Image (cartoon, helix red, strand yellow):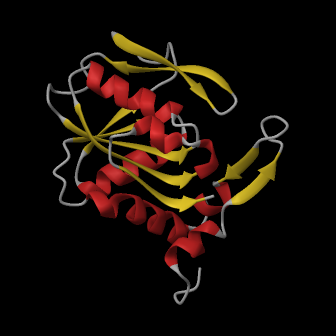
Amino acid sequence: MKASDNPVESVRRLIRAVPDFPKPGIMYRDITPMLADPGALALSVELMANPFRGGKFDLVVGAESRGFIFGVAVAQALGCGFVPVRKPGKLPSKAVSVSYSLEYGQDSLEMHADALPRGAKVLVVDDLLATGGTLKACCELVERVGGTVGGATALIELEALGGRARIAPRDVHTVIRF
């Protein structure tokens, strides 16, 4: 990454497009080259966290698996704790569950029933906003266990899939839009 580059473009250039993955017709945005660059990774976290600084969040929630990568880092940047949202059967204590649609199928997510103090202000974090299914499911889990969604942030948004509308009226910030 060059110091003179536009920060967003510096990160965007390290995201690889992989056609027809995981199935034909999908243009997968592979973040692994960006994750391997320490400067780009740090910049990505800052770009995701900055709009929410001063928002007095109690916790950050991130969905398995890439939401864990960015969620923990954004939580640290904001001085918050982190709550994982997992795939079914992965949590050891009583959990609540939400099923949802994603760009190429159906899935479910779970959160510990006691993960959030009642009224906790939460920032939901993921790597990608596509159809909005994952972020919406995370928001529903937060609200179901008594938290308040104060916003959502993702590194990448696939605008043509309209996911932002599924998260409305919540405040959604994305860094890179394809």
Observer-nearest of 104 and 71: 104
Q: Is residue 158 visible?
A: no
The C terminus, quarter of image? bottom right
Using residue 74 as the reference point, say whether residue 65 is left or right of it: right
Is 136 in front, or is 67? 136
Toward the top, the furthest residue is 94
Q: How many marks?
A: 0
Q: Is residue 151 above or below residue 136?
A: below
Say if 112 sits above or below 60 in the image: above
Is 57 or 148 nearer to us in this picture? 148
Is 65 placed left or right of 124 in the picture?
A: right
Identify the residue shown where x is 24% and y is 18%.
114
Residue 104 x/y as whole percent: 70, 30
Q: Residue 22 at x, y = what percent?
A: 78, 36
Q: Quadrant where the N terminus lies? A: bottom right
Tell me, yes or no, if residue 107 can be seen here.
yes
Where does residue 15 sit, x and y in percent of width and height?
Answer: 66, 61
Q: Quadrant of residue 120?
A: top left
Residue drawn at 53 percent across, 45 percent down: 129
Q: Is residue 169 above or below residue 51?
A: above
Q: Residue at x 33, y 48 (%)?
A: 171
Q: Position of residue 148 (x, y in %)?
A: 22, 33
| Residue visible at 48% across and 47% down in the picture | 69
